Image (tube, rainbow, N blue to C red):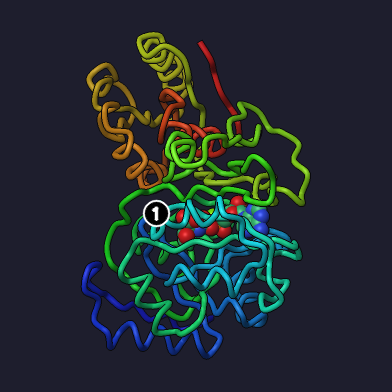
């Protein structure tokens, strides 16, 4: 057991005393959870292999799943990566700080445990004053996966970090809910054209506007498990975002989706199951059964993304046996949302 201290800070203007305390824990090889604009991360000194190893232990994360390195300044990229292409510089200029992670050729200073033994490193500069202040005060890059136990939905509130990691880490910086709610886009810059390995806060459309051509890894859009070579995208092969409840996603034309969900919910309720329905504002009133929660209006995909992981955890707290979720169109942020929903459901998908 570790003694976990909780430090409440303002998200815009964090108390420097508390940031310095957290930064000193990082420098000494400890583990600090902190907010970013996407989800909470579990940070350690990216250059200290012993500290990074503790991240895998605390999260119970498979040791071959590499960790994103977070920086507070654009030029830190040149210390952590080599052969940085012009295209990456354009993206850094356009989207950092922000939810875009770039996979580049790794430099010698990064320990192998941080990259899961790969010869590439994933780097991003988060758009959050607490994260940036922590990295600056620590005086070194911070390796941070999402601050959940491996396989669980990512944390969008400090309470989620407490649920999963209290007693397993040294500190939690709590600055309230995160803004984007799904993780950063992971873009592989070592291939041509660059390829999205994980859709996220910066969309395919955003990237194409800057680079022209950008491909999407088939597994990122898949409706079933896709075999992935480990060297390309190690994270994809593991179960992700899974609530305790069983889960089902219904995709298709909106009206038919509602009808199918009603039918399924009635069936499982009759069978004595506690059913949760993950709905949207436009469909809420159509469901007069089970535990119904709305992610927000379908007109605002950013709202759906922000609420998604929190609602999955809420269904678990209410002891739901089965979650039935509405799919959304795969455009813009919808691609990231569908990627998370399908994985959370273990690819239990009904298409109508
Ligand atoms: O928004 C985010 O990205 C959050 C916040 C905390 O920054 N972090 C996050 O980290 O989601 P994590 O570890 O939960 O997901 C990182 C993903 C994994 O799928 C991992 O396999 C992939 O990035 N990744 C990391 N390094 C990689 C590399 N060198 N090559 C390919 N994929 C990599
Ligand atoms: Mg994660």
Q: Residue at x 70, y 51 (%)?
A: 234
Q: Residue at x 55, y 70 (%)?
A: 143
Q: Secondary structure at mark 1?
A: loop
Q: Residues within 10 Å of mark 1 (few under 14, many from 20)?
A: many
Residue 266, compared with residue 155, is above or below; it is above
Query: Where's ligand 1: which quadrant?
Result: bottom right
65 or 270: nearer the eye?
A: 65
The answer to whether residue 339 is left or right of residue 276 is right
Q: Determine the residue positioned at 32% across, 56% down.
A: 178
Single out the residue that lies furthest toward the front.
Answer: 86
Rendered location of residue 45, percent (x, y): 55, 80
Residue 197 picture location, percent across and down: 61, 44
Residue 240 versus residue 222 in the image, above or below: below
Residue 155 position by quadrant? bottom left
Residue where numbered disc 1 is placed: 38
For label 1, being within 8 Å of ligand 1 is answered yes
Q: Residue at x 65, y 45 (%)?
A: 236
Residue 316 visible in rendering: no
């Amino acid at each position: 057991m570790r003694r976990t201290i909780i430090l409440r800070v303002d998200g815009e203007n964090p108390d420097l005393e508390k940031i310095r305390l957290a930064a000193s824990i990082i420098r000494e090889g400890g583990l600090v959870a902190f907010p970013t604009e996407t989800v909470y991360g579990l940070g350690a000194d990216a250059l200290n292999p012993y500290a990074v190893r503790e991240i895998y232990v605390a999260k119970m994360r498979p040791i071959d799943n590499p960790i994103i390195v977070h920086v507070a300044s654009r030029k830190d990229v040149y210390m952590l990566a080599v052969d940085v292409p012009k295209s990456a510089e354009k993206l850094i200029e356009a989207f950092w700080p922000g939810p875009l992670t770039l996979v580049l050729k790794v430099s010698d200073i990064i320990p192998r445990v941080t990259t899961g033994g790969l010869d590439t490193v994933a780097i991003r500069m988060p758009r959050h004053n607490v994260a940036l202040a922590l990295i600056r005060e620590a005086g070194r890059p911070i390796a941070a996966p999402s601050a959940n136990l491996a396989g669980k939905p990512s944390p969008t509130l400090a309470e989620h970090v407490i649920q999963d990691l209290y007693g397993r880490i040294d500190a939690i910086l709590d600055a309230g809910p995160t803004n984007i709610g799904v993780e950063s886009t992971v873009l592989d810059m070592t291939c041509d054209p660059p390829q999205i390995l994980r859709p996220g806060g910066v969309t395919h459309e955003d990237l194409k506007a800057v680079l022209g051509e950008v491909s999407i890894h088939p597994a990122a859009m898949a409706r079933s498990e896709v075999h992935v070579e480990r060297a390309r995208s190690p994270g994809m092969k593991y179960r992700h975002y899974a609530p305790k409840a069983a889960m089902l996603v219904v995709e298709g034309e909106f009206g038919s989706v509602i009808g199918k969900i009603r039918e399924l919910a009635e069936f499982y309720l009759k069978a004595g199951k506690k059913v949760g329905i993950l709905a949207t504002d436009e469909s809420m009133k159509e469901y007069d059964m089970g535990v119904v929660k709305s992610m927000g209006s379908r007109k605002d995909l950013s709202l759906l993304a922000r609420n998604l992981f929190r609602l999955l955890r809420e269904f678990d707290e209410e002891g739901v046996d089965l979650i039935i979720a509405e799919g959304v169109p795969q455009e813009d942020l919808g691609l990231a949302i569908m990627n998370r929903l399908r994985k959370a459901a273990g690819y239990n998908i009904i298409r109508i």
